[in-house]
Image (spheres, helix red, strand yellow):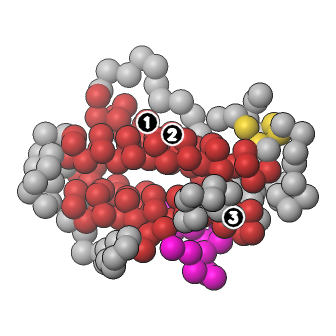
Amino acid sequence: MEHGKTSGRRCAATTDRLPSVKRTWPNNAAKDETVLAWEFLDFLRRTAVMKVDGLTRDLAAAAPIATSPQLTALGVLKHLVAVERHWLCIAGAGLGLPSLWEGSPDPSWTLTDDDTPESLIQAYQEEWANAEALKQRGPDDVAAHHKFTVRWILAHVTQETARHVGHLDLLRELADGQTGE
């Protein structure tokens, strides 16, 4: 099925507005590895947003898998906000932002009443803007935390985002039947 199509189970609680974000595939004739890596991360970021955009708060906060009570579309997106903040902004670029991971167990999966699709999409997009600071460093540069190269951090965040986009694929289909990229 094409993106935005449903398997016939469209839920009345899903909003019918158009997605708030557009995405394009990275350049298939790319010659610059770093540019390509950032383009793939951006593609995945936008895909994550598309999977949550249009869901009501109730659908986005639903945990449809009994053995994973914190695995919700909003929880995944909130976790991706924390991933970007920690790896790209703090560990990578050295920005003086507060961590979103402080606490045990990891609080980035725990929803508050203020967490909505709109608020978390906005927070995620704000982290994208913050992460632009990392682009000032070269891929082989040592990141701000001195344990990793920028290349490693970018690859790590890309693989983690891709994994969680897979979760969002399933959660969106379970929420309202929508399938596709």
Q: Which residue is mark 3?
A: 62
**In the structure shown, which secondary structural element does the residue marked by tag 1 occupy?**
helix
Residue 18, how many percent across, how many down?
78, 50
Give the magenta part as a residue range: 110-125
The residue lying at 58 percent from left, 65 percent from top is: 69
Q: Residue 80, position in %: x, y?
A: 45, 58
User: Separation of disc 3 and disc 1 at Cα?
Assistant: 29 Å
In percent of the image, x 69 and y 64: which residue is there? 62
How many neighbours does mark 2 have within 10 angstroms: few (below 14), some (14-19), or many (20 or more)? some
Query: Which amino acid, mark 1?
Result: Phe
What's the CA distance linking mark 1 and mark 2?
A: 5 Å
Kindly tell me whether residue 138 is visible in this rendering.
Answer: no
Which residue is disc 2 drawn over?
A: 43
Q: Which residue is mark 1?
A: 40
Q: Amino acid at mark 2?
A: Phe
Q: Say if the magenta span includes residue 86.
A: no
- Residue drawn where x is 73% and y is 38% of the image: 179
> Are the residues tagged 1 and 2 within 8 Å (C-beta)?
yes
